[in-house]
Amino acid sequence: VYRGSVKDFQGFDANQDAEALYNAMKGFGSDKEAILDLITSRSNKQRVEICQAYKSLYGKDLIADLKYELTGKFERLIVSLMRPPAYGDAKEIKDAISGIGTDEKCLIEILASRTNQEIHDLVAAYKDAYERDLEADIVGDTSGHFKKMLVVLLQGAREEDDVVSEDLVEQDAKDLLEAGELKWGTDEAQFIYILGRRSRQHLRLVFDEYLKIAGKPIERSIRGELSGDFEKLMLAVVKCIRSKAEYFAERLYKAMKGLGTRDNTLIRIMVSRSEIDMLDIREVFRTKYEKSLYNMIKEDTSGEYKKALLKLCGGDDDAAGEFFPEAAQVAYRMWELSAVKVELRGTVQPAGDFNDDGDAQVLRKAMKGLGTDEGAIIEVVTKRSNAQRQQILKAYKAHYGRDLMADLKSELSGSLAKLILGLMLTPAQYDAKQLRKAVEGAGTDESVLIEIMATRNNQEIRAINEAYQEAYHKSLEDDLSSDTSGHFKRILVSLALGNRDEGPENLTQAHEDAKKLADVSSNDSSDSLETRFLSILCTRSYPHLRRVFQEFIKMTNHDVEHAIKKRMSGDVRDAFVAIVRSVKNKPAFFADKLYKSMKGAGTDERTLTRIMISRSEIDLFNIRGEFVDLFDKSLHHMIEKDTSGDYRKALLALCGGED
């Protein structure tokens, strides 16, 4: 099935188009609208024919005339469209290695993503256009393992997809693990050989096997074992093996997000993928970033340049509201990855040489007399497990007849006080306090209710109920019921029971559950859409729900999260989405919340503090890994950049390391 956004123009006439372009550039000024309309609605093969007809009719070079008449980004885009794909890639690579410095990102993007045939055509086009050997030029401009992998890719000798060596899948996964995680140092040659030669289908199976035996995706191991441009190249290769559409969607998003636009990247991808997989890229973009590629281009560019890019994009998926096969495949792959059991690890471990009396004395000394030694307090509190902190509270009371919490409250202030005091509470007491704050006073903080209730297991929920009753002399369920309403209240009350099934998946039941969620035709008011989702999402076990979500994708070609967003709104939608994301990948859910708490102007310190405290002994190490995977920066780095003083020092201690 053709998945490009630009197709052959019906009723094409090369001479007629050549004449139209000549007239658009004749005389004073040029008709840019006519030029972009014509060129973006013809396929590359047809544009090549127009160039030939133009030369035959007028004895002039069409590309030279377009360069003369047009300017800036618009000129670069139009001229790029006129070159055959292989010559376009050759020009990009020539520009990337010419002059001072090298555009490694361009080299990585092109060589990691092209097929064997595309690589062979590129090498030939480079030779024809510049009378130089591409491999020799790249060898002369790069170095080390980065150079070696580029040379391997330049051979265009990857095994074809019908070559899958089942016996080798397990061995390759084992070899990659032993070359990196299990080795002192890294055997880069093994990474180069396997990732540079094996077929895409074979490597997808290797990556699945690697996840099973290593307990982490291959990408995370690459980040930990490799570095610099070599690391970036190998990550790009892995991403392209998994899904080229997802790789290019990510590249396009990064080209436009934030201040400024990376126009060279934007032009190169929009041109090179317009007749290959632009529809797939659009679909993945819409799913992954919750906005259409069309709208992002519209917001980020202007003038004829914008109009031409939108023509190449070929449509607005926000308007269509559709979800397509490629996006479904990406979603399905994510569900499969989430189903693999990964060991959860906190960043705060019990201190090996723990002495509750000694710690109590250190804390008393830090608060005695004039001034407070915040550093000493941070050192003790952040380096002890919660169980050890409870022992310190008792030892402090026994030694000094004083309440440590009260002393800390009087000596500390601001964000640091909230963080340290939160760490001194038991997890259940802390969650109960956060829930109480969310419902008391004017207004309700629904986001806190959703975050806590949607992510805690049965045991944690029951402990929260007990702590809430003890601290506030009323039940959590009563407060949730009186402060919320409708389907949202029913969701929270159901979750507050802590009665989620804890059994394994049931395939027959999962199929029925998926069918129930997919049914939009039911007119029975007692069986509303929200009621059906509540009865499944709030009661079924996590392993079972993962299977339900996979069955849902098979059945509808939709991701369940997309369906929720399309069919529901407000707090009900947000609660169901949080449950789905928690089931899919809880560390990734919290990584996203942490990123949003720090990105942009200002910091949401309440969310940042709450998650760092509540996950520090459960899965903060895993959250750090997901953070890097999702946002290409470490949690440590973002905390360091976004906070300050003793509050930052304490957060970084909880974070537990730089990734």
Image: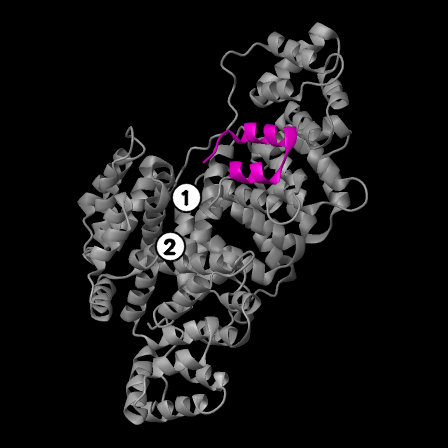
Residue drawn at (24%, 62%), measured in percent from left and top?
Answer: 119
Dot 2: element: helix
In the foreground, 364 or 149: 149
Residue 199 visible to an observer of this rendering? no
Question: Between tags 1 and 2, which lies in front?
Answer: 2
Q: Is residue 258 left or right of residue 339?
A: right
Q: Is residue 412 left or right of residue 531?
A: right
Q: Residue 445, percent across and down?
A: 71, 45
Q: Is residue 474 left or right of residue 607?
A: right
Q: Vertically, is 512 above or below 301?
A: above
In the rendering, which numbered label is found on residue 10? Answer: none
Q: Is residue 323 left or right of residue 570?
A: left
Say if the magenta span includes residue 446.
Answer: no
Q: Residue 482, percent across and down?
A: 77, 44
Q: Which residue is mark 2?
A: 105
Residue drawn at (46%, 92%), measured in percent from left and top?
Answer: 27
Between discs 1 and 2, the one toward the N terminus: 2
Q: Which residue is mark 1?
A: 339
The amino acid type of the residue labelled 2 equals Lys
The amino acid type of the residue labelled 1 equals Ala
* Residue 371: quadrant of the picture: top right
**Label 2 crowding class (10 Å Cα cut-off): few <14, some 14-19, many 20+?**
some
Q: Residue furthest top?
A: 399
Q: Residue 435, percent across and down?
A: 70, 37
Q: Vertically, is 452 above or below 335?
A: above
Residue numbers of the magenta segment = 635-659
* Residue 20: quadrant of the picture: bottom left
Q: CA distance from mark 1 to mark 2?
A: 33 Å
Q: Which image quadrant: the N terminus?
A: bottom left
Dot 1: element: helix
